[in-house]
Image: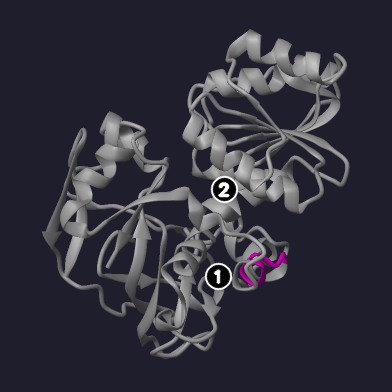
Amino acid sequence: MKAAIFKGVKQMACEEHAEPTIIDGGDAIIRVVRACVCGSDLWFYRDGSKEPNTQAGHEAIGVVEQIGDDVTVAKPGDFVIVPFPFSCGKCPVCKAGFESVCPHGGYFSACQAEYLRVPEADGTVVKVPGSPEDYSDEQLASLLTISDVMSTGYHAAVSAEVKPGDTAVVMGDGAVGLCGVIAAKMRGATRIIAMSRHEDRAALAREFGATDIVPERDQAAVDKVLGMTGGYGADAVLECVGSKQSFDTAIGLIRRGGVIGRVGLPHDVEISAEGTFYGNIGIKGGPAPVRHYDLDEGLLDAVLKGEINPGRVFTAEYDLDHIQDAYEAMDQRKVIKALIRL
């Protein structure tokens, strides 16, 4: 099969790789129909923190090809979403709705390929009615987002405890941040401030529900938001970047008693225990429990009914033979999110 392989810093390649096989009774083999490049993939692409000559990717939708003897959630021919975490679905952590940190699970790293092995299939995959052929390209793109970015943006809003009437700030104008704008609107925020200095991304944020765009950074951004909120700050902040700059700004503009929902993979972030203590500032979040949000919180239904269209974050399409181009385009911010058609 064809698979995306990380070769070294800023080097991706499409190479022939052995197809995955059933290893355990709980496994399923998926024929991937859509995958994509995530902003978090750019960390290893830029700094070489991933082992060279290994597969890449953690977002996919596809069709079940084979199942192990213990799999009951799906059968060959079923159309499924593959959340970026895999999980047992049975333990107390999963039952509490936090499959993304299941002690028996883990994270995918081989989804940019023609075939994928899914361990713990019963606790992981999300079945979609019908087959891929029943959906338009736009619908397939939106279904792909709820394997990660839309669910992650929703996790930011849930973690920040966004509620009706709130003023919410979204840090980050990548795909997760833009999906965070959708999520904040879904949860009833009436003022949504998107922090963006790129007009194409700001335009999409407005389309998704942002009421205000703030291009400033650092203290200037803090001052601007404080000025917009009577000096008090935002009720909720969705931190969708993970950088020190982004998190420090979030701390500066959250109101006392507010909550920061953090979903950006943290890099060099330090949190002041004393600073958050005296502001009664809550900080919650982490990897998104995708399956919980897709099924129990209604993201799958919202996409199927056309109530949300997060697939708009894909602004360019590639195939596996052009995986290097897909990564380069995202690295250079020429596209918001790159879709891989298989």
Direction from residue 305 to residue 38 in the image, left or right? left
Residue 75, percent across and down?
44, 90
Question: Does the magenta stretch mainly form a helix, a strand or a loop?
Answer: helix
Q: Earlier in the sequence, mark 2 or mark 1?
A: 1
Q: Amino acid at mark 2?
A: Pro
Q: Residue at x 36, y 61 (%)?
A: 35
The residue range painted magenta reads 297-302
In the displayed structure, 259 sits above or below 74; it is above
Residue 112, percent across and down?
29, 59
Residue 62, percent across and down?
39, 74
For the image, the number of numbered tags is 2
Local SS, label 1? loop
Local SS, label 2? loop
Q: Residue at x 33, y 71 (%)?
A: 32
Q: Which residue is mark 2?
A: 287
Estimate the spatial distance between the alpha carbons at disc 2 and disc 1, rounded to whole Å: 16 Å
Q: Amino acid at mark 1?
A: Cys
Question: Is residue 155 one of those drawn in magenta?
Answer: no
Q: Residue at x 74, y 48 (%)?
A: 185
Dot 2 alpha-carbon crowd within 10 angstroms: few under 14, some 14 to 19, many 20 or more: many
Q: Residue at x 17, y 65 (%)?
A: 2
Q: Which residue is mark 1?
A: 88
CB under 8 Å between discs 2 and 1: no
In the displayed structure, 313 sits above or below 70; it is above
Q: How is the image coloured?
A: one colour
Residue 298 at least partly seen: yes
